[in-house]
Image (spheres, rainbow, N blue to C red):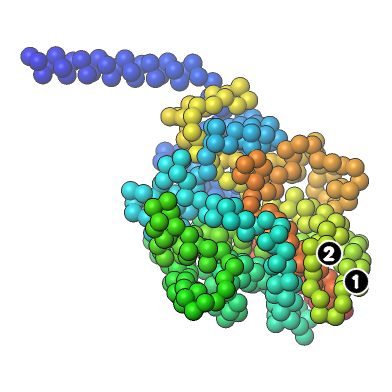
Amino acid sequence: MEVFTLALFIITFAIIIFGFSRWADRDTKLPPGSFGLPVIGETIQFLFGKPEKFVGDRMKKYSPNIFKTKILGEKTAVICGPNGHKFLFSNEQKYFAAFRPHPIQYIFRSYQTKAAATPPPELPRDETKVLRQPGFLKPEALIRFLGKMDTVTQQQLQAHWEGKDVVKAFPLAKTVTLALACHFFMGMDNPERIARLVQHFDDITVGMHSIMLNIPGTIFHRANKAAAAIRTELMSVIKEKKDAMASGAKMQDILSHMIVITDPSGKFMPEAEIADKVMGLLVAGYSTVATTITFLMKYVGLNPDVYGMIRAEQMEIAASKKAGEFLEWEDMKKMRYSWNVICETMRLVPPLQGTFREVLTEFISSNYTLPKQYNKRVYWTVSTTNMNPEYFRDPQKFDPSRYENGEAQAPYTYVPFGGGPRTCPGKEYARLAILSFVHNVVKYYKWEVMDPLEKVNGDMMPTPEKGLPIRLHRL
């Protein structure tokens, strides 16, 4: 009898709770949208229909500010437009915390047990903390690296383009960018080793936002194989670095800092964790910069007047240098028009489509309520304002002058590096790396884009299908 009474009580309680939750859901004004198919939701449309189009279509159908969906296994609220940007940037750590989709966690957290694969929001395992704390990306630190940026760019142009009539811009952009990242993060200057890593980094970049199907032939499987190959290489680099440090060599790179840093209990970071974190930093400093350099080459090649203005600016800087002198901080400040060209390139082809956040607590946005138990993730998208004629006159046109003709962008309409507490810590590094490339490429070359209508493939990393072939003219 007692068992029957207890069972009846449990069933009654469950019915009450279920009824209350249904009533609460009905009473809560949730964002419009669709969760799509069972289990997979709208993941296929998101990954294979281009995220920018996926978001744009749903903004028109549901709301220009926020809508709901289900992608990469999670019910997700997509925050859009300047109102969404402002809301997100103003409420970091209040409503939102950093979050990496499960494919990224799997790829970059091999050193953790499954139980620890997802750290709690209050203890984020974020590589950017390593960058922010010792100030590696502050101007005073980057100044010391400018000469190396200049040197590496010159060396790569000489090695891959000198004496050639037709080349592909995308492969060089990737090699230059990875060479810079390897030197900056690890103090590594080994062209053969870097060349071996390029394809692996491409596979990881594509696999970071993919369906977690780890069987041969899938994008996710290729990403994991690439990550394993990079880890093997990085473990060798770490051992070499430790040996060099033990022999008294002076080290000023981020890898050296990771090797000597300790946690509050005095423990050093395990080598496996160092390898995964360095790999994450290299990916962050690789794909976005390479993408911007590539499409800058395209748009400048298609606009001779823009090329002429960039070259005039850069040659004036070059004329002020003595033979053998490298670029300095004051030189970078003079590259105003060149930076406008870079900004316009990032507007038309955002190097990063968006990022995810963990929802910490219930919040209200655009008069819609987002209960935490109902919606655990937010996807913030960069590009929802870039092509809107309300914010950018003639948005399809490549026009760097829009940044200097009094067309100041309205707040939160142009945010290629994010904003608020989580503004990309590598913004200044990226700016200097791209400007250094621009300085050297226009000083020595003029070029023509051979296929202006070349198809651009890409989900989270836009990629010219043929590698952007260009015809070079040595100056």
Query: For the point 31% across and 15% down, which residue is it?
Result: 16
Kind of residue indicated by mark 2: Asp
Name, please, the residue furthest toward the left.
1
Front residue of 22/416: it is 416
Kind of residue indicated by mark 1: Ser
Q: Is there CB contact under 8 Å for labels 1 and 2? A: yes
Query: For the point 42% across and 38% down, which residue is it?
Result: 38
Q: Which residue matches tag 2? A: 331
Front residue of 180/106: it is 180
The percent position of residue 386, horizontal first and vertical second, equals 74, 44
Vertical position of residue 56 compared to residue 199: above or below: above
Q: Secondary structure at mark 1?
A: loop
In the rendered structure, the answer to whether residue 49 lies left or right of residue 447 reads: left
Q: Which residue matches tag 1? A: 320
Q: Residues within 10 Å of mark 2 (few under 14, many from 20)?
A: some
Tally of marks: 2
Quarter of the figure that contains the N terminus: top left
Query: For the point 67% across and 56% down, which residue is it?
Result: 138
The image's mark for residue 424 is none
The percent position of residue 55, horizontal first and vertical second, equals 62, 41
As measured in the structure, the alpha-carbon distance from the residue carrying label 1 to the one carrying label 2 is: 9 Å
Query: For the point 54% across and 36% down, which residue is it?
Result: 93
Q: Residues within 10 Å of mark 1 (few under 14, many from 20)?
A: few
Name which of mark 1 and mark 2 comes first in the sequence: 1
Residue 200 seen in the current view:
yes
Front residue of 461/274: it is 274
